[in-house]
Image (cartoon, rainbow, N blue to C red):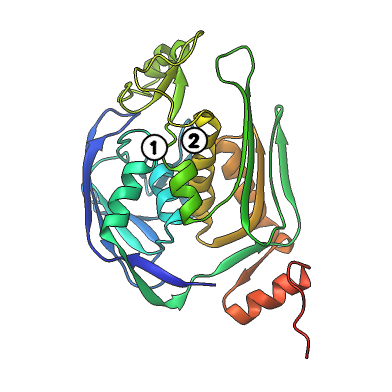
Amino acid sequence: MRKQRTIKEIVKVSGIGVHTGKKVDVIIEPAPDDTGIVFYRTDKNVLIPVNQNNVVDTTLSTTIGLNGVYVKTVEHLLASLYALNIDNCIIRIDNEEVPILDGSSAPWVYLLKNASYVEQKHYKKVLIITKPVKIKENGKFVALVPCRKFKISYAISFEGTFINKQKYELEVNEQSFIKEISKARTFCFLRDIEYMQQNNLALGGSLDNAVVVDDYGVINEDPLRYENEFVRHKILDAIGDLSILNYDLKAHYIAYKSGHNLNYKLVSSLLKDKKSYVIIGSPKQEVQVLEDLGFLKPAIG
């Protein structure tokens, strides 16, 4: 187990929301132990803690809300905070959507790393999966199964398109996230843009903040950042979606063609089945549970 963290310096950033197209200013501030991640809509004077109960929409992104006030597209920022082990902060935001920046988590990682962090007094609680939780829906699949680390195995399939099939697997930690996941950008198909904009989505989208694919390949002038950037971005989204649990995870997340909605259903299903997990609050308890699950050899003597 590790101690909780908050940021050392304030982070400020401005940008536009990818779906709303609205300009937004964000200020991330340090917070005390056990605060968690909390959005503060400064234009509405409403605090919105990040948790499963406050997820209100999962259409093409994850939206949290409280009392009719929302913050959309939180997943890239949340993934960055989770991967960098930043557990407590207040995110002051003056509009309804987190800025998309370049469509990846890389700018958030850069800003948060420059802000540095402060180790706090309390331990970060750990959620350990003790039995599998699975969801199958419309040819899609997602699961959390027992594992001594936080591991992700993800596969996507867009047969008949340039993307085709991709898969990727990694153990999630700060270093692997920064190197292998953080730079992967959100993506869409050119043919879907008109439909999305007719439904008030992707109004702020551009080739500067998304990879756009047509029948022949990527239409962006910039090359792909990874050969399999598309599945890596889906992993980025999944980390952000799972972070709403507010625990460090010891689990193997396995997904085929999943997305924000299925990830939310997985989290909800997990929390409803209290026999499928255990919450750990101390290093001694963590060792005991991992030994009981067979992930560690019992101490002798």
Horizontally, residue 206 falls left or right of residue 79, namely left
Residue 25 in the image: x percent, y percent?
21, 43
- Pointer 2: residues within 10 angstroms few (<14), some, or many (20+)? many
In this view, the residue farthest toward the top is: 215
> Does any portion of residue 50 appear in the rendered image?
no
**Residue closer to the observer: 283 or 30:** 283
Q: Which residue is mark 1?
A: 104
Residue 259, located in which quarter of the rendered image? top right
Check whether the beta carbons of the residues at disc 2 and disc 1 lie within 8 A of each other.
yes
| SS state under label 1 | loop
The span from disc 2 to disc 1 (Cα, nearest Å) is: 8 Å
**Which of marks 1 and 2 precedes in the sequence?**
1
- Residue drawn at point x = 63 percent, y = 38 percent: 154
Badge number at residue 233: 2
- Residue drawn at point x = 27 percent, y = 56 percent: 114
- Pointer 1: residues within 10 angstroms few (<14), some, or many (20+)? many
Residue 171 in the image: x percent, y percent?
59, 52
Q: Is residue 87 above or below residue 91?
A: below
Badge number at residue 299: none
Q: Amino acid at mark 2?
A: His
| SS state under label 2 | helix
Horizontally, residue 243 falls left or right of residue 223, namely right
